[in-house]
Amino acid sequence: MVSRVSATKGWQDTGFKVEAGETYTVSYLSGTWTVDHRTFPRVGASGYASSADSRIHQGCKLDDHRPYGTLYLAEGTGDAAAPVAQGRILHASRGGRVRLRINDDDRCLADNAGSVRVKLSRGVPATALTDPFRHGSGEGRAPYRVVQGYHNNKGRCVIGRGPDHCANQLFSVDLEPTDKAAVSAKVYSPAPGTVRWRDSDTGCLGMDLADGMNLTVCHMSSFNVAAGASVRRNEVLGVRRTPWVHLGVDDRRAGRPYRPVTLTATTSGWDHTLDGAALTSGHEDGVGDVEAVQWGGRSYRVRNEEWAGLEGP
């Protein structure tokens, strides 16, 4: 379901009910908001960058540890609030209806403006990506950081039909575990699918997802799966040869224009989020170092290294 969350209201009931222990996904779709329409620009669900947040009076935050404008969530009637930002995969700590709001205290909402649209799904959508890292035991998710994210023009490794991180890999990301020593070198499948190709030179393989899109996973020294194999989410694909793993989604279906695919949620069709986070570019305002990149007869508006520094899960 899709819910619109206003910046001028406190906690808002989405009508989405969860049971204790249930897994569900909340992802940002679109929209912008501001905590002061007279002074500060509108931002998405991640809230303000630290440089802008530091210029806003700090006496009105719901949570002092996160920027103003961050999307927050609570379950049932409980007071515990968790940041959602661009999106998260959650395990319900209690039953009840999910509530959402902006990170801004109720007494300071009068000068707010705008709203964001959010998608709530049960479980993890089949085509949505989860990170490829696990602790050394193979159990438990491992925190990571995006070290390269969207439109990186430094890499010259050729994957498929274009240079790494530009052209066909325009919306790809490189993920690196925060605690490298504690994380297994195994690469765990970010989604269920069918392996279509492997390339020993680049350490890459390509998988067909449930919607026919290609998922590229790179930087492996050896493979545990063969071309044609069906794999489950979290199944071991191989062993990585670098501290980081490369992930990218693109459309390689026969008879269609070849194009890169953003890691976003959609109101119809399939999601390609990363651990629930929708890496939605937006850029409707055209502010900043936005570039118009041409590929496959289309123009894409994107910033260089837009998601570098993002942390998860």
Image: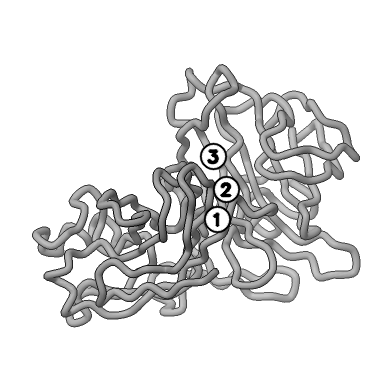
Q: Residue drawn 25% across and 61% down?
A: 103
Eye-nearest disc, 1 or 3: 3
**Colour logic:** one colour
Label 1 belongs to which residue?
150
The amino acid beneath tag 1 is Tyr
* Label 2–label 3 contact, CB within 8 A: yes
SS label for mark 2: strand
Toward the viewer: 247 or 85?
85
Residue flagged by tag 2: what amino acid is it? Val
For the point 57% across and 17% down, the residue is 137
Q: Quadrant of residue 75?
A: bottom left
* Number of numbered discs visible in the structure rendering: 3
Residue at numbered disc 2: 173
The reply, left or right, for residue 56 in relation to residue 305 is: left
In 3D space, how far apart are the residues under numbered discs 1 and 2 (Cα atoms)? 6 Å
The spot of residue 256 in percent (x, y) is 84, 70
The image position of residue 252, as x and y in percent, is: 81, 59
Q: Which residue is mark 3?
A: 175
Whether label 1 touches label 3, CB < 8 Å? no
Alpha carbons under labels 1 and 3: distance apart: 12 Å
Question: Tag 2 or tag 1, which sits nearer the N-term?
Answer: 1
Q: Nearer the viewer, residue 147 or 271?
A: 271
Disc 3 marks which amino acid?
A: Leu
Is 2 on the left-hand or right-hand side of 269? left
Are circles 1 and 2 on residues that touch, CB within 8 Å?
Answer: yes
The residue sitting at 72% across, 49% down in the picture is: 215
Q: Residue at x 62, y 48 (%)?
A: 129
